[in-house]
Amino acid sequence: MERRKKLGRPVSCHSPFSAKIICGECGGFYGSKVWGSNTKYRRTVWRCNEKYKNDKPCSTPHLTEDEIKKRFLKAFNILMSGRDELLANCRLAQEVLCDCTEIDAELEELRREIEVVSELTRKSIYENARFVVNQDEFNERHKGYMERHRIATERVAELEDQRRNRQNKLLILDRFMREIKTRPFVVEEFDERLWLAVIDKVIIHDANDIHFTFRDGTAITV
């Protein structure tokens, strides 16, 4: 939800395709549209939500859900042709990209710095209240402590955000790998759980140029 919010992705739709399919022309998300709602030809299609918001409509096509599912299965089966190497690369990515050892070490140093500065600030305020102290010197010293505290706390927030992102990536890759391991090399039926576990985004340029980007970063065009 946090990642979608940053990207401006909608979160209210319950469809597995929501916030996944992107127009390759304008970058807008695809949304579901009902055609012929009051006729026997009623069907749901997915089309760029921004298609008619500019002077020139996007040329990217609409797709039915069955077409999306069919293309996904084709892309996934291509992905599975190199499953062993794929899993090895995922494990390597977890070791390299998801490691938090250096972040944790720096966080520990910064928290010690914050404790030291907080104590120095407390002592400085106590002395100023109890003894005669040059106020210019006190203000300058206090300003320095506040600046050190600000720099440290901002860096802590930055590192904690990086740590969350790495942990999230670790969990995403774990789920991705579990699905890859348990599936046959050829999947013939669409599975919503599989789609949600392995697909990061789908970019549509035209009917014959659809890019599927998987959770591990692999991109396949079908």
Image (tube, rainbow, N blue to C red):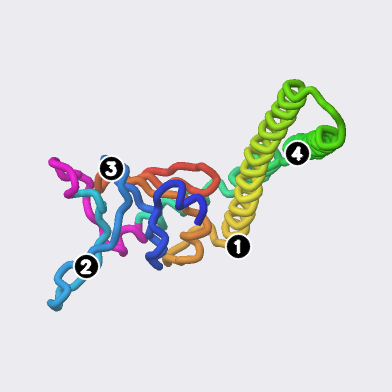
* Residue at the disc numbered 1: 182
On whether residue 56 falls in the magenta region, the answer is: yes
Label 2: element kind: strand
Residues under numbered marks 1 and 3 in contact, where contact means CB atoms less than 8 Å apart? no
Q: Is residue 216 visible?
A: yes
Give whichever of 149, 26 is nearer the camera.
149
The answer to whether residue 221 is left or right of residue 38 is: right
Residue 4 locus on image (x, y percent): 46, 52
User: What residue appears at the point 24 percent right and 49 percent down from the top-left corner?
Assistant: 50
Label annotation for residue 205 = 3
Q: Where does the magenta region start and end?
A: 52-70
The kind of residue tagged 4 is Leu
**Mark closer to the chain start, 1 or 4:** 4
**Mark closer to the chain start, 3 or 4:** 4
The kind of residue tagged 3 is His
- Give the distance between the C-alpha atoms of the residues marked 2 and 3, in whole angstroms: 22 Å
Label annotation for residue 107 = 4
Give whichever of 163, 95 is nearer the camera.
163
Residue 164 locus on image (x, y percent): 64, 47
